[in-house]
Image (spheres, rainbow, N blue to C red):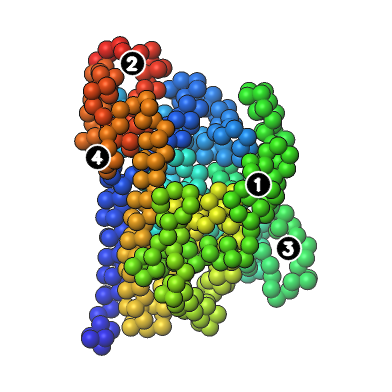
Amino acid sequence: MLNRITLNPNLPTRFVLAALGIAFLNFVFTLMPQNVFVHADYFRYILQETTRDGLGIQWLDLVNSFQLRSPGEFRPRFLAYGIGAIDQKIRLVLYDYILVHPTFAPLAWFLQLFVGPVLLLLFIRNLTGSLLAGIASVAIYVTSVGFLSGFTMGLLQGKALSNVVYIAALYFASRVQLKARQGEFLYQVRGFDKYLLLGFLFLGMFIDELPLFAFVLVPALFLGLFIDLRNVWSQVKRTVLNAGFFSLPFLLFLVFVIIIVPLITQKYFNFYFDYLGNLLAMGENKRGAHSIFSGPYATLSASLVFENFTNLFGISLASKELSPLVKGAHGDYFSSQSQNFFQLIILGAFFSVAVFLAFKRKLTYSIAFRGMLIAVPFFMVFLTLLQIRHIPVATGYYYGCTFAVIFSILAGFIFNATSQIGQRFRFYASVAVLLIVLVQIDNFFAINRGWIKTHNEDMTRNSFSSVLSLGPPASLRTSDLRPIWKAWRQGQMQDYLQSTPIPAGAVYLVYELRTIDKFRGVSPEKKNPK
């Protein structure tokens, strides 16, 4: 059988393309209403901030992006707030013409669905020289928990957009490396790509805290742009100049959030934006944290870092049938995966192959491959530091979603390196890509169902059952949403809501439509056919 397989060089390509096709079909199915939900905070609080100056997109939206989205939470996610505001306002405009998908966010979706995967494909191709490796990486990326959760949950898209920041930064760094002459550092390479790299790093810090790790990933994968390993000590001056050039986005970010932003918030919103107090857990803005290493829910420890490591890689590599998912203490959803024999064997095999290929095989991208492997434990420490202030262990669903980028790049590197050994190994690698895609899909839907139940049937139902007539727990369908929207267009939504119980998952639609009516001066009782 294997001899016949080796005679068909197109078979690995077909497996990889099949994985991409399955990924596409899975994405379409994932967007069905029963597979998505809108977080109550998105329509209860964030929507009110978004529309504080009206429904239209205007320059005040820029100013309002500096307003807090949670009391005492001084996080400089202004770009994420701005993108979210525009997306919400576009949604409200579209309701006059169509029933908008529950989680549709036009700007964020364009970046996540098109810009991210395309640049990932080009990045892998730039480093490996293989388009098929890029396709394999994209197939794995778009079936990951971290990617799909950016479409199944309606909420601020900062964390999901962090994926795009990682990918864009690495892509432009790869273009810089392709243009670099022998011995040139980042700041010396001609062309505009190095400035685009710095630009994405700068903007990324206004999306979420996760993009900070891009400052580690870029040097880890493109070490030659930062250090001359043959003449380290004789190149100290150039190395320092280069480090200063690469640090410019971070330094400008600090100046902006520490000096300029407080002036803006005091003038327009009458509060002092205390970024350092929030970050370092100092003063009145600790938000439950005891220090930067001890949050309200956990303290940084080696065991917690290891648990995040096995959890994230396990959910991408080990199916829930072999390594069962475990429910956590923060809701009725799976928050981790069992650290059992099967999981550890699979993870051990994955990293054994990765380390062998990265350090024993001669590859054009060996430095980037090794750099990514070395960056993994640092990423886990960084992520755990963030998680101890939220949910200590991440599955990649919203929290820790940037793991999807790291894993898909590693998988692309492994696929290409294995394929170079021979046709038979190329076949094995293509089968592995298909299996990873299937495992990720299987694990994602189990995790996603738990998040839907927790947010719709626990959070939303508990918060709104006293003000709206809610039906029994049930999956959300388009047939639940369309009658509400049609009644609103006929000016009869209030009558419909009084006579017909709605699913908890449809509450977001009522609040969005009521927001439109509020700014148009339409009271709930007033009939205003459209």
The local crowd at label 2, few if under 14, some if 14 to 19, many if 20 or more residues have their Cα within 10 Å, is some
Q: Amino acid at mark 2?
A: Pro
The tag on residue 239 is: 3
The tag on residue 477 is: 4
Residue marked by disc 1: 289
The local crowd at label 4, few if under 14, some if 14 to 19, many if 20 or more residues have their Cα within 10 Å, is some
Q: Earlier in the sequence, mark 3 or mark 1?
A: 3
* x and y percentages locating residue 514 in the rendered image: 36, 22
498 to 448, vertically: above or below: above
* x and y percentages locating residue 426 in the rendered image: 35, 78
Label 4, label 1: how far apart the Cα atoms are = 40 Å
Label 3, label 1: how far apart the Cα atoms are = 37 Å
Question: Contact, CB < 8 Å: mark 3 with mark 1?
Answer: no
* x and y percentages locating residue 510 in the rendered image: 34, 27
Q: Earlier in the sequence, mark 4 or mark 1?
A: 1
Question: Contact, CB < 8 Å: mark 1 with mark 2?
Answer: no
Residue marked by disc 2: 524
Question: Contact, CB < 8 Å: mark 3 with mark 2?
Answer: no
Disc count in the image?
Answer: 4
Q: Amino acid at mark 1?
A: Ala
